[in-house]
């Protein structure tokens, strides 16, 4: 009877962490279901198959597959190979610092590239508008103002890219070192 109570207490403490992770997965742009899956893998002693995860969490196979795919795309989970096992196995990536670096750079580089490309195209069109002798002075002035705003934003994106470079090279750790508490 005592063992059951201890097991229940352990399960409750794990459940608290899993629930917190699930609630905060929106920060990564993924569902709470993926968060629960991540929490399950975090506490697992071994890599798990989709069937094992499905059974443990009571999720549909489709939901489970989508959650695993989302976590794989963010490099938070990895597929692992175990000799003699024919099914795919998954575990979390243990280096949380690298997971953060990967997530941050993957998401932000995508946004920076999309925004920068649109702004560069816009600047090109604005230059055409400014150079057109038929453009009124009022429109030309507004186009120049817009170009200045866009160039300032491109400078900002350049700074963001350099920040992301420091994540990828881990130079950021020279300014914000990883400090591990001694056990």
Image (cartoon, rainbow, N blue to C red):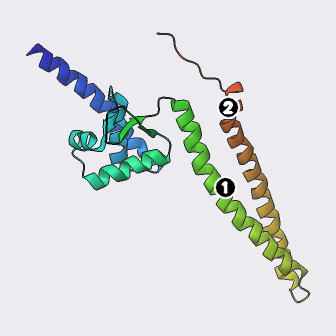
Q: Which residue is mark 1?
A: 112
Q: Residue 149, position in %: x, y? A: 78, 63
Q: Which residue is mark 2?
A: 170
Q: Residue 25 lies in what quarter of the image?
A: top left
Relative placement, left or right, of 64 versus 129 is: left
Q: Which of the two labelled residues, at mark 1 and mark 2, occupies the earlier sequence position?
A: 1
Q: Secondary structure at mark 1?
A: helix
Q: Secondary structure at mark 2?
A: loop
Residue drawn at (33%, 47%) of the image: 33
Q: Judge whether 131 appears above or below 9 on screen.
A: below
- Observer-nearest of 147 and 45: 45
Q: Residue 35, position in %: x, y? A: 37, 42
Q: Residue 4, position in %: x, y? A: 13, 20
Circles 1 and 2, Cβ within 8 Å, touching? The answer is no
**Where's the N terminus, which quadrant?**
top left
Q: Foreground mark, 1 or 2?
A: 2
Q: Which residue reaches farthest bottom? A: 134
Q: What crowding class fits label 2: few (fewer than 14 Cα within 10 Å), some (14-19), or many (20 or more)? A: some
Q: What crowding class fits label 1: few (fewer than 14 Cα within 10 Å), some (14-19), or many (20 or more)? A: some
Q: Residue 105, position in %: x, y? A: 61, 45
Residue drawn at (71%, 37%) of the image: 166
As drawn, the label of residue 83 is none
- Observer-nearest of 15 and 75: 75
Q: Judge whether 134 appears above or below 27 on screen.
A: below
The span from disc 1 to disc 2 (Cα, nearest Å) is 20 Å
Q: Judge whether 149 appears above or below 21 on screen.
A: below
- Observer-nearest of 80 and 117: 80
Relative placement, left or right, of 131 versus 167 is: right
Q: Residue 121 lies in what quarter of the image?
A: bottom right
Relative placement, left or right, of 115 versus 125 is: left
């Amino acid at each position: 009877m005592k063992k059951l109570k201890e097991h229940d207490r352990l399960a409750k403490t794990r459940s608290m962490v899993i629930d917190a992770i699930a609630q905060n997965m929106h920060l990564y742009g993924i569902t709470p279901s993926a968060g629960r899956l991540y929490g399950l893998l975090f506490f697992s002693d071994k890599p798990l198959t989709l069937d094992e995860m499905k059974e443990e969490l009571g999720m549909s196979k489709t939901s489970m597959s989508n959650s695993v795919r989302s976590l794989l795309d963010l490099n938070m989970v990895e597929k692992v190979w175990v000799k003699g096992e024919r099914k795919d196995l998954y575990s979390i990536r243990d280096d949380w610092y690298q997971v953060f670096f990967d997530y941050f750079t993957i998401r932000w580089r995508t946004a920076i590239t999309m925004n920068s490309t649109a702004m560069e195209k816009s600047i090109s069109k604005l230059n055409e508008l400014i150079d057109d002798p038929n453009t009124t002075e009022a429109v030309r002035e507004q186009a120049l103002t817009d170009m200045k705003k866009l160039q300032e934003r491109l400078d900002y994106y350049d700074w963001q890219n350099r920040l992301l470079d420091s994540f990828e090279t881990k130079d950021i750790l020279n300014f914000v070192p990883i400090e591990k508490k001694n056990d």
